Image (cartoon, helix red, strand yellow):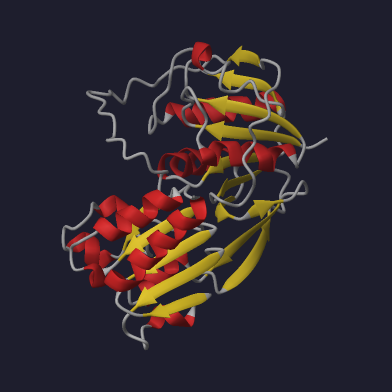
Amino acid sequence: MTHVLVFFDSVNAALTGAQQELLTHADALGEVSVVTGSAAEAVIAPLSLEPVENVYTGETAITAPDPALADLLETAVKEVSADIVLGAHAPDTVDALARLAVRLDTGLVTAANGVTSTGVATKSVLAGSYFTTAQITEDAPLVATLRPNTAERMTTPGAAPEVTVLPVSASGSLEVLEETELPKSGRPPLAEARVVVAAGRGVEGDLSLVEELADELGAAIGASRAATDAGWIDHSAQVGQTGVVISPQLYISVGISGAIQQKAGMQTSGTIVAINKDEDAPVFEIADFGVVGDLNEVLPQMIEEIRRRKA
């Protein structure tokens, strides 16, 4: 039996979409355990899901990027004799798993699309132009982070897992001075969203139609670097090689030319719809559906049709 250890740097009252997907991946591979930096009393309810049998925590809550997370991970790997360690492809998780890989003298595969029970990881490279496979050849666990939107989301209720507190505590080298809750937009997180509407230079600073379309579709809002540099939207919304790399099921590009840096962030999307008044825009080279037209004329028609069909 393959032993899979899933790492969540923290667990809130409800699991994120990416965390649910990790459990789906793990459930298909073998016996599932979870290790998390959250306190033991906080994890039972959200992790009472069908594939989760055991949960491991530290003696105290350990907040990323505390290096003690690597201690917690290493201890948990030995406790369960893990064959595979999985985490979400997010900065804090990559940091902790990279430290773990060094400790275990094994390899780390980041942004994988999937793994097999024999420890083979598949990932897209070069802006989605190629797929590669990687396998750990030594007698050591495979450590990998998985991209969002690569599996269904596990939500099947189960029995309360057995929680084991490991002899690991916060290092004391990290002090949280203040926590500020992010503003709630009612939209899904960009990295995990299954539908994304992205705005570029063509919106000329007016994102009202993009926001209206996103809300009708239950989508996240992304943007090109031109739009974020202009101050029209926060830099956290930037999709691209130097921004957020996403793989939604549907990506709608509005007024974005589609330069190579932008393509690198969204080219692996399931379906790409491009709207641009320049018929020679590079984005049409990778779009599944393209509309050559003024976004101020096209988007209202799309919104009206979506509302009509909903009704």
Point 31% across, 54% down: residue:
211
Is 216 positioned to the left or the right of 105 in the image? Answer: left
Q: Residue 5: horizontal and vertical position, in percent? A: 65, 33
Q: Residue furthest bottom?
A: 280
Closer to us: 231 or 216: 216
Closer to us: 209 or 163: 209
Residue 293 against residue 116 in the figure, above or below: below
Residue 306 against residue 277 in the figure, above or below: above
| Residue 174, picture quadrant | top left
Quadrant location, the N terminus: top right
Q: Residue 228: horizontal and vertical position, in percent? A: 23, 60
Is 31 positioned to the left or the right of 292 in the image? Answer: right
Q: Is residue 115 visible?
A: yes
| Residue 208, picture quadrant | bottom left
Is 53 positioned to the left or the right of 206 in the image? Answer: right
Residue 125 against residue 76 in the figure, above or below: below
Point 30% across, 50% down: residue:
236
Point 50% across, 26% down: residue:
14
Q: Residue furthest right?
A: 1
Q: Is residue 238 visible?
A: no
Instruction: Count the marks.
Output: 0
Point 37% across, 88% down: residue:
280
Q: Residue 252: horizontal and vertical position, in percent? A: 43, 65
Residue 193 against residue 75 in the figure, above or below: below
Q: Residue 145: horizontal and vertical position, in percent? A: 55, 47
Closer to us: 234 or 144: 234
